Amino acid sequence: MKASARATANSSLSDQELRSTTARSFRSESRRKPASTAEPRTKLAWWAVLFLISPFVPWLWAIGSMAISPYRLVLVITVLPCLGMWLTGKAGRILPSDIAILLYCLWCMVSLTVIHGFRSAPESGGIIFIETAGAYLLGRCSVRSAYQFYAMARLLFWIVAILLPFAAFEALSNWNVSLDLFAKLFPTHVLAVNVPRWGLRRVQTVFEHPILFGVSCGGILAAVHLVLGEKQSPLRRWSASAIVWTTAFLSLSAGPLTALAVQTMLISWNWLLHGYQERWRILWAVLFANYIFISFVSNQTVPEFYLTHFSFDQESAYYRVLIWHFGSESALNHPLFGVGFNRWDRPDWMPGSIDMFWLYHAVLFGIPAGVLMLFSFLLLAVAVSFKKGLDEKLIQYRTAYLIVMIGYFLVGWTVHFWNATYVLFLFLLGSGSWLLDAGADDGSTTRSPLPRRPAAIPQTHRRKIITRRV
């Protein structure tokens, strides 16, 4: 009887121990969730949020001879931490486009030293490094997953949506109320010379020029439609796209509107032929045939044809043709180091503005700088376009990124990106690099499952344990 009672007590005790051990094991396993099943970061870092807001804040401060804007202040603070993250591999592997960006900054510094001497080169070259490499690396380091790419698109959409009523008011009333509101606290940049079109004011809002407003707001159209609208109903998706379209349209500038039209056509092409894998090869064939056709039937080059036939103002279109002719000639006259901030080679009657982003760097800093800037763009965009092993969601995100970049690439032949628009473009360029490190699992939006509860110990094993203890 005593032995039986002792066995019963030990059996009860062992059951309790087993249950307690199982519970402790479950809690322990829950705490030790492996890195492979850890939840991905879904939010942008605070410095990335500040940066994405800062281009839309037009304040200007002066420290000595240096102008400080909000976006420049953010980049000054983040450039070294981002450089450290990049060097230690926290932004993924080092890419050829990274090297091209850094070599561009180095060449600009060398060019400015040769043209203007050692005194002015450090300040100007330092600003170029901060705004170029700083913005690009911030995009590389801040956006490392589909979740963060989505968060970036969402934040930019809401900024554009907030600007829409101010833009509409400015277009109808000829009063830039948004700039005046910011000017009540700190100095801002001045109003641009504005010639009305179609009876409306060309909207500038918080940017230096209506063109920059149109490029910055319209550049995110594909990201809003394909990323932000991925899980939305057609009504909500197209409504969000319409907000971006309307806001950017109020710039009434041919360059930004061309980028909007190209993005819309590419989105439509992707939607119409979504189930056909060869759709992009067909598009390339159509574009090539179009190029050949225009080359034969027109007495203009293909770029000149589009510049002169798709513009609000024939005079400004003709001026861009002149920029290409005289700008490229100036770059060839000063092929190695450019002209720096001196007068570039052009007729006396021609203004000094170079409204062509992809030509600007070659004219000012030499052909190597122009090639490096173009290569930094193409190397990353082409690498992302050929990335294999992505699931359906990541393919859609990649399509959005590439369409955004195509819009910037095309509009860059008709306008120049400077200040806030320049750093925003480079951030967006770097923000797609995570796709090169992504796998098929990275696009999943489902939460990682909890660790499985350890299986209960079979009854036969319990008897053996109890028997041994008895």
Image: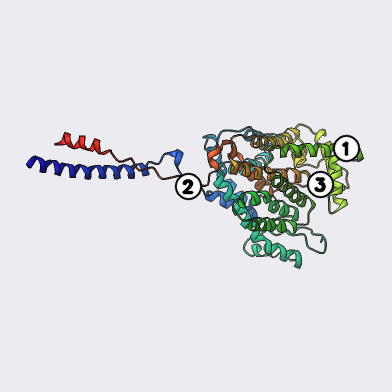
Between the C-alphas of marks 1 and 3, the distance is 30 Å
Q: Classify mark 3: helix, strand or loop.
A: loop
Q: Classify mark 2: helix, strand or loop.
A: loop
- The answer to which of 80 and 41 lies nearer the viewer is 41
Q: Classify mark 1: helix, strand or loop.
A: helix
Q: Badge 3: how crowded within 10 Å, few (<14), some, or many (20+)?
A: few
Amino acid residing under circle 1: Ser
Residue extending furthest bottom?
173
Amino acid residing under circle 3: Gly
Residue under circle 1? 295
Residue 147: image location, x then y, percent: 55, 47
User: Is residue 414 visible in the rendered structure shown here?
Assistant: yes
User: Is residue 67 visible in the rendered structure shown here?
Assistant: no
| 1 vs 3, front mark | 1
Split into 4 quadrants, where in the image is the N terminus?
A: top left
Q: Badge 1: how crowded within 10 Å, few (<14), some, or many (20+)?
A: some
Residue under circle 2? 447
- Which sits earlier in the primary sequence, circle 1 or circle 3? 1
- The answer to which of 369 and 269 lies nearer the viewer is 269
- Which sits earlier in the primary sequence, circle 3 or circle 2? 3
Residue under circle 3? 352
